[in-house]
Image (tube, rainbow, N blue to C red):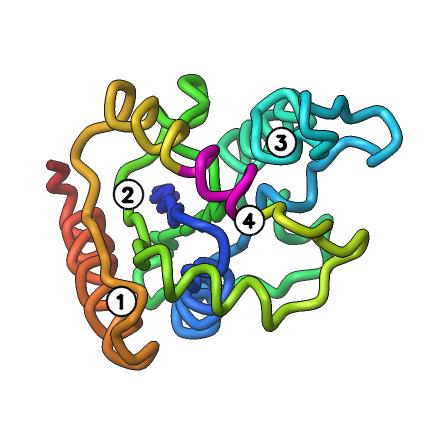
Amino acid sequence: MKRLVVGIGGITNGGKSTLSQSLHQLIPNSFIIAQDSYFKDDFILPVDSKGFKQYDTLDALHMDKMMMDVDSWRADPNLFLRQRGRNITPSSNNSEIFVLIVEGFLIFNYRPLNQLFDKRYLLEIPYEVCKRRRSSRIYNPPDPPGYFDGYVWPMYLKNRQEMERIASEIVFLDGRRPKEELLADVYEDVCQEIDRLRVGVTT
């Protein structure tokens, strides 16, 4: 039994979830852990001097719970999947490769998690595209007036700068490219890693 941990990070509305879900559908014995599933309750999150809720920080997330799930998968991916009702696809030589896809906007900013990734991909889109995509989505609670320019984008730049001090060996992806092209590139890259694991060669 061999394991591969893939991180798909990046800016809000950059295409992380779409890419992760598509990759999961193509890779047998894979599982997605999404950082957005670990937000703390809205009412306990602090606000800044402008009255904006502080969502885009590690303190807004139950990173301890997220790490418990990641560690549970790493300890026994087979059992982890079975406990969640997922069927295992056996390999022809009984040497299954299990792939964990971790996606989120701050996955490379949390050192204990960042150090576990075998492959790191970061989706980027420019300010104008991000603002347009963000404005077309419905959030609960909804973004207050001025939230993108007053909080979301400045926090992205701050977190991006911090990430660059922590993480390395990141493959940067242009989130404006057709999703089929992005998927093809990442899938090919991950498959190469899977093939290396199969023959017992690690990089």
Query: Which one is in front in this view, the residue at disc 1 or the one at disc 2?
Result: 2
Image: 71 above or below 83? above
Residue denoted by label 4? 148
Between the residue at mark 2 and the residue at mark 3, the CA separation in whole angstroms equals 18 Å
Front position in the image: 24 or 3: 24
Residue denoted by label 2? 120
Q: Earlier in the sequence, mark 3 or mark 1?
A: 3
Between the residue at mark 1 and the residue at mark 2, the CA separation in whole angstroms equals 13 Å
Query: Which one is in front in this view, the residue at disc 4 or the one at disc 3?
Result: 4
Residue 200 on image: x %, y %: 16, 43
Mark 4 secondary-structure assignment: helix
- Is mark 3 in CB contact (under 8 Å) with mark 1? no
Question: Label 3 neighbourhood size at 10 Å, few (<14), some (14-19), many (20+)?
Answer: many
Question: Label 1 neighbourhood size at 10 Å, few (<14), some (14-19), many (20+)?
Answer: some
Q: Earlier in the sequence, mark 1 or mark 4?
A: 4
Disc tally is 4
Residue denoted by label 1? 187
- Is mark 2 in CB contact (under 8 Å) with mark 4? no
Front position in the image: 203 or 1: 203
Q: Residue at x 25, y 27 (%)?
A: 164
Residue 83 on image: x %, y %: 73, 48
- Is mark 1 in CB contact (under 8 Å) with mark 4? no
Q: Earlier in the sequence, mark 4 or mark 3?
A: 3
Query: What's the residue type where badge 4 is placed?
Result: Phe
Mark 2 secondary-structure assignment: strand
Question: Label 2 neighbourhood size at 10 Å, few (<14), some (14-19), many (20+)?
Answer: many
The disc at residue 66 is 3
